[in-house]
Image: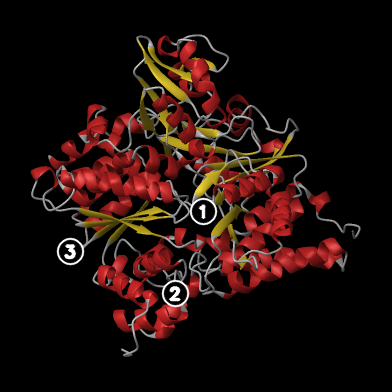
C-alpha cells in the first residue's frame, strides 16, 4: 500500500486525525490530507484507493493503524472498522452532492488536484460570456441566498452590475456564527478553490476588482486553508491583474472577524470590513448600491458563492432541476446537537425533517426521544415532533412559523429545558446586540428577566402577557434580524411546550 | 508621538501599523496583528494605533471593546475556550461549564491567580455534531466531558 487519505478537517482533527496521519506516515505510507466527507461519527475516516473505488475505515485511532495495514486495507480488506466503498455508504449515496462534490476527495491545498477534478471549468465558461449573461445564468438557476434570507442571488448581482461605477466589491460572508452550522467551514477547509472560483466569477460578472472573505476568528483552520489556496490561485494566474489572461482584474483577501455574532448581518459585516464597530446600518441604501466604502457591493454567503462554479460549468438548468417550488437546487443541511450520526447532508430541497433526523441522523445520540429541533440557528424556531414532516423548503417552513436559515439542525432529547433555552435566546441576543436599536439592546435583557420572574412565580400570568408584548416589540421594532428574530425560538418554545413555562418550585 | 524609549510592546504595535496601515479600513487588521503578537491590546497601544492610523482614541477604544475577541488584559499562559451555543447545550455543555469554572476557580473572561489559565466562552466553533467542543491554545477537542476536560488540562500541564 502506498497511499491513504486522512481528513485534515477540524472536526476530524479534534477526534485525533493528526495522530492517525502521523501513525501512517511512520509506517512509510504516503498520507494525503483531505477535507471531511461530513460523516462525523466515522471520523477520523481513513480512505484507500482500490480498483473498485475508495474504501473507508472509521472511526480510526492511531492504535488501529498497525491492525488495519495487517488486515490488508490497501485491497479493502475486512476489518471491524471497514465501511466498504465510501460512496456506496447509504448516508452519502442518497445525497445529491453538488456544492460538496469535491469535498473529502481532493487535497484542498492542491490547485493541481482541483483542476484534475474539473475545477475552474465554470470560470472558463464565464470568461467567454458577457457580465449580463453570467448574471442571467445565476438568475435562471433559481439560486437564492443560502445565508438565511433566501434573496435571489441573480437579482442582487444584477443590481450591482447595473451601477455605473468603476469601483465595486464582492464580499463573502463567512462569519458562520449560527450554532449547529458548519457547511461554510467544510467548504473553506475542504474545497477553498470552489469558493475562490465562485467569487472570481462574481467579480468578472459585475465588474468588481476586489473581493474580501470575512471569515470567523473561531475558524483558524479555514483562514489558513483559504490563504494557502488564494496564494496558489494567484501565482497560477487565476487571481490578480489579469484573471486567466482575460485582462480582467480580480484580487482577493481574507479578513478575519473578531467574535461578534452581529457581523453575520450584512451591513454590520460591511462596517466591520471597514474597520469599524459592527453596528447595523439602516437600509436603504442597499449594499448592492452603496456597500463597502460606499461602493456597489455583492454580499453573499459562502454556500451561495460556492454553488456558482457548477452553475456556470453545467448551465443553470442543471442546477434548477433539483428542488421544489421556489426553492431550487440543493441545500446543505447540518445535523448537529444530540444526534447519533451528525454530519453534512446535501440534498435537493423537499426532504422532510423526519427523514433527516431519523434516516440520516439515526435518532438521538443519547438514545432518548427527540423532543425538539431548532432549525436555522439561534434565531430559528423550535419545532416539536408534530412538525417533523415539514419538508425543507423556504416557503413550507415559513408556513409553520419557522425558518430554514443556513440549514443548521440542532436536535434535543427529552431532557431539554425549553424555558431555559428560551431564556438563553434572550441572553445570547443581549450579549451579541450591537446596541444601536432599543428593542434589541434593552428588550433582550428584559426578556431574560421576565422569564426569570415567570418561572419564580411572580405574577406569572402577567409575565406571560408581558413576554408576548415584548416579543412583538422586538419583531416589529428592531433594525435587523438579531432583535427581530430572537422572539422566534422564544415564541415557538412557549407555543409548543406551554407546560414548561409555569412557575417552578425553588431549589 | 511621544519620545519615550520604545518598548517591546510599542515596537510590536509600530510593526503592525507599518505592515497593515496602508490597507483599506485597516483598524481591525492592525488590532489582530497586535493581539497576535502580544496576546492582548494594551492600553498604551490604543493611543499609538490612533496616532498611527489618524483616528481618535475614542474610535479605536470603541472598536476594541465592541468585539468579544479583543482582550484588554494580558491573558494567562494558556487559553481555554468553551462553546456555549445550542448544539453543545444539546450535548450537555452546561455541566462542563460548571465543572470548568469550579475546577479553575474563575469565571469567563478571567485568568487564574497564578497566571496559568484564562477561560473564555465562545458561541460556536463549527464543531456542532461532536460536542461539547473546547479549544485549548488553538487545538480543538470533541466530546469533552468533565472527566475529559480534567485529563486534557493535566495532559497539557505535563506537556509544558
Report in which chain the residue with disc 3 lies: A
Pointer 1 chain: B
Mark carried by residue A164: 3
* Residue of label 2: B63
Q: Is residue A59 visible?
A: no
Could you say which quadrant of the image residue A413 lies in? Answer: top right
Where is residue A460 shown, x and y percent of the image? Answer: 85, 64
Between B69 and A87, the one nearer to me in the picture: B69
Q: Is residue B102 visible?
A: yes
Mark 2 — on which chain does it sit? B
Number of marks drawn? 3
Q: Name the secondary structure under disc 1.
A: loop
Contact? badges 3 and 1 (CB < 8 Å):
no
Q: At x 66% / y 47%, what residue is drawn?
A: B149
- Above or below, A124 against A492 in this view is above
- Residue A48 location, x and y as percent? 40, 18
Which of the two discs, 2 and 1, sits closer to the camera?
1
Q: Which residue was labeled with disc 1?
A: B137
The answer to whether the residues at label 3 and label 2 have Cβ atoms under 8 Å apart is no
Amino acid at each position: 500500500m502506498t497511499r491513504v487519505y486522512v481528513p485534515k478537517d477540524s472536526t476530524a482533527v479534534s477526534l485525533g486525525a493528526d495522530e492517525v496521519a502521523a501513525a501512517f506516515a511512520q509506517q512509510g505510507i504516503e498520507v494525503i490530507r483531505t477535507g471531511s466527507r461530513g460523516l462525523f461519527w466515522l471520523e477520523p475516516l481513513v480512505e484507500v484507493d482500490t480498483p473498485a473505488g475508495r474504501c473507508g475505515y472509521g472511526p480510526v485511532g492511531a492504535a488501529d493503524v498497525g491492525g488495519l495495514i495487517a488486515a490488508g486495507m490497501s485491497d479493502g480488506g475486512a476489518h471491524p472498522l471497514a465501511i466498504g466503498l465510501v460512496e456506496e455508504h447509504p448516508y452519502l449515496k442518497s445525497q445529491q452532492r453538488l456544492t460538496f462534490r469535491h469535498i473529502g476527495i481532493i487535497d484542498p491545498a492542491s490547485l493541481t488536484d482541483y483542476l484534475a477534478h474539473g475545477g475552474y471549468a465554470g470560470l472558463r465558461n464565464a470568461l467567454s460570456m458577457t457580465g449580463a449573461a453570467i448574471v442571467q445564468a445565476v438568475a435562471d438557476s433559481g439560486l437564492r441566498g443560502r445565508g438565511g434570507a433566501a434573496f435571489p442571488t441573480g437579482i442582487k448581482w444584477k443590481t450591482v452590475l447595473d451601477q455605473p461605477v468603476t469601483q465595486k466589491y464582492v464580499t463573502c460572508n463567512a462569519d458562520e456564527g449560527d450554532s449547529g452550522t458548519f457547511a461554510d467551514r467544510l467548504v473553506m477547509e475542504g474545497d477553498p478553490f470552489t469558493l475562490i472560483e465562485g467569487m472570481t466569477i462574481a467579480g468578472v460578472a459585475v465588474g468588481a476588482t476586489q473581493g474580501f472573505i470575512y471569515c470567523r476568528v473561531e475558524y483558524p483552520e479555514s483562514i489558513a486553508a483559504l490563504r494557502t489556496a488564494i496564494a496558489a490561485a494567484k501565482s497560477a494566474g487565476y487571481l490578480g491583474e489579469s484573471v486567466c489572461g482575460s485582462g480582467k482584474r480580480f484580487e482577493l483577501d481574507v479578513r478575519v472577524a473578531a467574535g461578534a455574532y452581529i457581523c453575520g448581518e450584512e451591513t454590520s459585516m460591511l462596517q466591520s470590513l471597514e474597520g469599524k464597530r459592527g453596528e447595523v446600518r439602516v437600509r436603504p441604501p442597499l449594499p448592492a448600491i452603496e456597500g463597502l466604502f460606499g461602493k456597489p457591493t455583492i454580499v453573499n454567503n459562502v454556500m451561495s458563492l460556492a454553488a456558482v462554479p457548477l452553475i456556470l460549468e453545467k448551465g443553470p438548468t442543471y442546477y434548477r432541476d433539483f428542488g421544489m417550488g421556489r426553492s431550487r437546487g440543493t441545500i446543505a443541511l447540518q445535523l448537529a446537537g444530540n444526534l447519533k450520526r451528525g454530519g453534512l447532508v446535501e440534498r435537493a430541497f423537499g426532504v422532510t425533517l423526519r427523514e433527516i433526523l431519523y434516516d440520516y441522523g439515526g435518532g438521538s445520540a443519547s438514545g432518548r426521544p427527540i423532543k425538539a429541533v431548532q432549525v436555522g440557528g439561534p434565531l430559528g424556531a423550535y419545532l416539536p415532533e408534530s412538525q417533523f414532516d415539514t419538508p425543507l423548503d423556504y416557503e413550507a417552513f415559513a408556513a409553520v412559523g419557522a425558518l430554514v436559515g443556513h440549514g443548521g439542525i440542532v436536535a434535543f432529547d427529552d431532557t431539554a429545558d425549553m424555558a431555559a433555552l428560551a431564556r438563553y435566546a434572550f441572553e445570547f441576543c443581549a450579549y451579541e446586540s450591537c446596541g444601536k436599536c432599543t428593542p434589541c439592546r434593552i428588550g433582550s435583557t428584559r426578556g431574560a428577566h421576565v422569564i426569570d420572574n415567570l418561572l419564580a412565580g411572580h405574577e406569572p400570568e402577567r409575565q406571560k402577557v408581558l413576554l408576548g408584548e415584548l416579543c412583538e416589540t422586538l419583531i416589529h421594532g428592531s433594525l435587523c434580524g438579531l432583535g427581530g428574530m430572537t422572539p422566534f425560538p422564544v415564541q415557538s418554545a412557549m407555543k409548543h411546550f406551554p407546560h414548561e413555562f409555569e412557575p417552578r418550585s425553588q431549589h | 508621538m511621544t519620545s519615550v524609549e520604545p518598548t517591546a510592546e510599542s515596537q510590536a504595535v509600530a510593526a503592525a501599523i507599518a505592515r497593515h496601515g496602508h490597507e483599506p479600513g485597516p483598524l481591525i487588521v492592525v488590532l489582530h496583528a497586535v493581539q497576535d503578537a502580544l496576546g492582548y491590546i494594551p492600553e498604551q497601544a490604543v493611543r499609538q494605533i490612533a496616532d498611527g492610523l489618524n483616528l481618535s482614541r475614542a474610535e479605536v477604544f470603541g472598536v476594541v471593546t465592541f468585539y468579544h475577541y479583543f482582550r484588554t488584559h494580558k491573558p494567562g499562559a494558556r487559553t481555554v475556550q468553551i462553546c456555549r451555543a445550542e448544539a453543545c447545550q444539546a450535548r450537555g455543555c452546561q455541566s462542563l461549564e460548571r465543572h470548568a469554572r469550579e475546577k479553575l476557580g474563575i469565571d469567563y473572561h478571567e485568568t487564574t491567580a497564578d497566571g496559568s489559565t484564562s477561560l473564555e466562552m465562545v458561541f460556536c466553533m463549527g464543531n456542532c455534531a461532536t460536542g461539547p467542543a473546547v479549544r485549548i491554545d488553538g487545538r480543538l477537542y470533541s466530546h469533552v466531558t468533565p472527566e475529559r476536560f480534567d485529563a486534557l488540562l493535566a495532559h497539557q500541564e505535563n506537556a509544558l
